[in-house]
Image: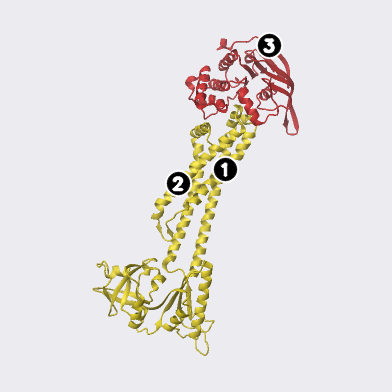
Chain colours: A yellow, B red
Amino acid sequence: MFDIERWQEIFDTIRKNKLRTFLTGLSVASGIFILVILLGFGQGMQNGIAQEFQRDASNMIGVYTQVTTKEYKGLNPGRVIQLRDENYEFVEKLHADKLEYKSPMYRVFDASITYGKESGAYSIWGTSPHFQQLENAFMSYGRFLNYKDSQEKAKVVVISNKIHRELMNGIENPIGEHIEISGLSFQIVGVYGDVGGEREEEKIYMPVSTAQGVYNGADRLNMMYFTLKPAETFEQSLAESTRFTEELKTYLKQVHTVAPDDLSAINTFNTLEEVKRFYNLTGGIRFFFWFVGICTIVAGIVGVSNVMLIIVKERTKEIGIRKALGAKPISVIGLILHEAIFVTAVFGFGGLIFSMGLLEIFGPMVEVDYVVNPSIDFRVALITVFLLILAGALAGFFPAYRAAKIKPIIALRDE
Amino acid sequence: MIEIKNLHKSYKMGSNALHVLKGIDFSVKEGELVAIMGSSGSGKSTLLNIIGMLDTLDEGSYTLDGVPIKDLNETKAANYRNKFLGFVFQSFNLINYKNAMENVALPLYYQKVGRKERQEKAMKYLEQVGLKEWATHLPSELSGGQKQRVAIARAMAAEPKVLLADEPTGALDSTTSYEVMDLIQKINDEGNTILVVTHEEDIAHMCKRIVHLKDGVIVEDKKVKQVRAKNYV
């Protein structure tokens, strides 16, 4: 390894066989390059999908009602089931120890909002202070709703960045400004943004009690939202949230006199189940990219092996000459392997650095749906390079060993 | 220098064996210039390959400079070849991507001579064969005679006990052949032992002794009056 004479001999050989060296190197470098780019985009897709799923809290359970479809206890199908405050309060009290965030929701679509001369139509969502966490909203200005607002049925609202921009473009900080909603004046206490993007920013939040009061909602609710405290593992969380959802349904069916087998009256959704699908999906994507990547590496290994075989074949006569001049078999094998390892290493790392540089520079620029910041684990790439070097060495070893073993007279006759 | 007793060698050709050498007794003293003659298939090249340890013997004994050559593995053979022998081949066998000087320096690499010294020595031997100005040329840029002279310089660079030349003039025209033989004679004049395999009468008569091989046995072994190649150049 540290035999300077051999290094010189190898550099001589490389310098004088540029094409051969280049071709060997190219198959190594391109294998690494393809793998890195592939795995990078696999990671990018995973990131992209993860971002799509970031819109809401990932362990959220929502409940909403529709009409009954089954006759039950003498009641006709087609009844409208209405969630009420008492339902929410009951669940809240019963599961107090399990719940992390919770919110009732009373909603009005297309409320007309006026600020000065500007006006627009947005949804009004009456919620609890927890809704910020449930929606994954972040505050740009001011605060979200708080407990006091709910208690006092305060006429306060939280608007979105989008509404802020559309209605009051000239005002830098709208906190304390008043907007008119259906003729009533409300004070802005906060401006929120949503991780999920602008399509989640069509809503104005106010305390649920205020919304019910203003829109004659009495004690009616449109939906209820809950998140459970996370369990140790994902599987446990999923099991707990599934059980909670079932309990919730059973309770609501009882109090609203709905047939236990009515699938339409009481509806729930559970984002955790979506998360599970997401995990399966990204798992599948990762598997796919690894599969393709490994195939690429195998192709690279085959390529390197092939080139090594041809090189040794081509050098059979040279080996014969060297042996006639007194080269020992071990020195012949050493020479060939040393060169093979050196060339694969240099080109392997070259391909690695080039492709990783490309990902580093252009990765963050990629702005396509479902692909965000393609990147690659450096260790994975490094291991791949070593694997290729090892493969090149192995592929070179066997023909080199055989060539070193054959009698020089036979090698010399090889034309 | 070379002592061979009752040497047998056969090659397996499928199911039947081809008996090439059938009991050769042969010895060469230091400083001799011996031509081994015979028609093709007489076993002359095989004999030379065995002497050169490029091939193994089946039966008999072979002693080179007092060292019995037997039970050779590749590593041992390589060692002996490097220490004792220099080769000149009909097809030159230069490494085509190395220039003349690097080709000459190659056996010294296997003698673990340092790079600087290797190059100096190589240049010295190239000068002796009159190719100093061609040191940086690749074999493909040299004529046949020049290539053979590089090969001779390479064989001499290792300072071997015996120089073995297998049809050194086989691929050359007569003028060039005589030039090469002139060189071989000069090397012999300095006291080196040389074996030349040839089937050309005139080349053989430029040696000091001619050994005739026919069907695997020595049929004639005679001293001759050396014809100096210089007269024909």
Tag 2: amino acid: Ile
Are the numbered discs 3 and 2 placed on the same chain, yes or no? no
Of residue A57 and residue A228, the one placed in the foreground of this image is A228
Q: Say whether marks 1 and 2 touch (CB < 8 Å).
A: no
Which residue is the site of mark 1? A305
Q: Residue at x 41, y 67 (%)?
A: A55
Which residue is the site of mark 2? A353
Give percent across and percent down for residue A131.
39, 73
Tag 1: amino acid: Ser
Q: Quadrant of the C terminus of chain A?
A: top right
Residue A338 visible, this angle: yes
Q: CA distance from mark 1 to mark 3?
A: 56 Å
Nearer the viewer's eye, disc 3 or disc 2? 2
Q: Which mark is residue A36?
A: none
Mark 1 lies on a secondary structure that is helix
Mark 2 lies on a secondary structure that is helix
Give percent across and percent down for residue A205.
35, 74
Which residue is the site of mark 3? B223
Vertical side of A237 occupied by B28: above or below: above
Residue B9: quarter of image: top right
Say which chain tag 2 marks.
Answer: A
Q: Earlier in the sequence, mark 1 or mark 2?
A: 1
Q: Residue at x 48, y 67 (%)?
A: A275
Residue B225: quarter of image: top right
Residue at the far bottom: name it.
A74
Callout 1 crowding tier (Cα within 10 Å): few <14, some 14–19, many ≥20: many
Tag 3: amino acid: Lys
Mark 3 lies on a secondary structure that is strand
Give percent across and percent down for residue A360.
41, 51
A141 left or right of A354?
Answer: left
Q: CA distance from mark 3 to mark 2?
A: 71 Å
